[in-house]
Image (cartoon, rainbow, N blue to C red):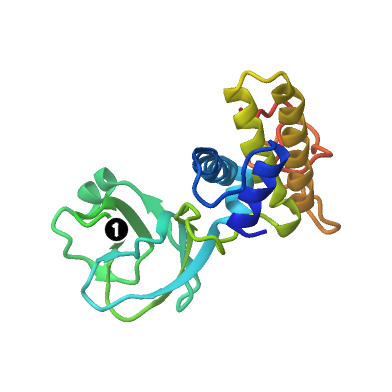
Amino acid sequence: MTFLELQNRALKALNLSTATTTEPRTRIKEAINDWHRRILTKPQFTRLLRDRQLTLTSTANIHTYAFASSVKRINGLTDTTNDIPLKRRDLTWLRQQDPALDIDGIPVVYVFLGSSSSGLLQIQFWPTPAGAYAYLVDYTASLADMTADTDEPLLPEDFHHVLALGAQADEWRRMDDDRYVALRQDVDLELRNMNAFLWDLADSTNERRDLIGGRSRLGAWYPADGSWR
């Protein structure tokens, strides 16, 4: 569904006007984007729906590199030229290891330096690259609000409607409508279904960072006591 279709779906369910410019439409737009962000910042959904890869080639004697604004978090780097997964260290480690930064060679470590003055994420290789090496960078992409009517959510298409349900629930909560409680339960159920859709695959493993005990039948990343509040 497009952003406009989601807005109209929620407005019609609430028996509100679908006129182009109204106060309810403005609230629904904000609520849809809020739910989109809330869902996609959950680790189990971030990993499959926002995580990306890019390639980077080092330059000899240059140790610091910045990424595009679309890169929100660095998850890992792999040297594909030399088949080396780089280890992540902090700046304190680097200062103790090579205070003068005068060691070069094939990097085995990267240090996250935070954001530059222009807001771009930066890393530093150690040792300083002695040549041009190709890297595969695993990263989490930034999340932008939908603004154009034709924008579409990053969720699987079968679950776009969850955003309209969430926006409808928020509106009922604002009006202190008792129907909010039942609708929120529906939203939670749909999110569990989406989690299972994404993770319960025929060839899936028991992969889950916070797994304690057996694997959840709702998906490898779904905690039994999870909440979407």
Residue 194's spot in the image, x, y percent? 75, 47
- Image quarter where the N terminus lies is bottom right
Asked whether residue 208 is in view, the answer is no
For mark 1, give the secondary structure: loop
Q: Is residue 13 placed above or below 19 in the rendered structure?
A: above
Q: Say how many tags the image has.
A: 1
Which quadrant would residue 12 be assigned to in this image?
top right
* Front residue (pair 178, 67): 178
- Image quarter where the C terminus lies is top right
Residue 222's spot in the image, x, y percent? 72, 38
Q: Which residue is under mark 1?
A: 120
Q: Is residue 81 left or right of residue 175?
A: left
User: Residue visible at 77% across and 33% down?
Assistant: 186
Residue 34's spot in the image, x, y percent? 52, 40
Q: Is residue 156 left or right of residue 32?
A: right
Q: Identity of the amino acid at label 1?
A: Leu
Q: Is residue 183 placed above or below 101 in the rendered structure?
A: above
Q: Mark 1, residues whose alpha carbon is within 10 Å: few (<14), some, or many (≥20)?
A: some
Q: Is residue 223 left or right of residue 103?
A: right
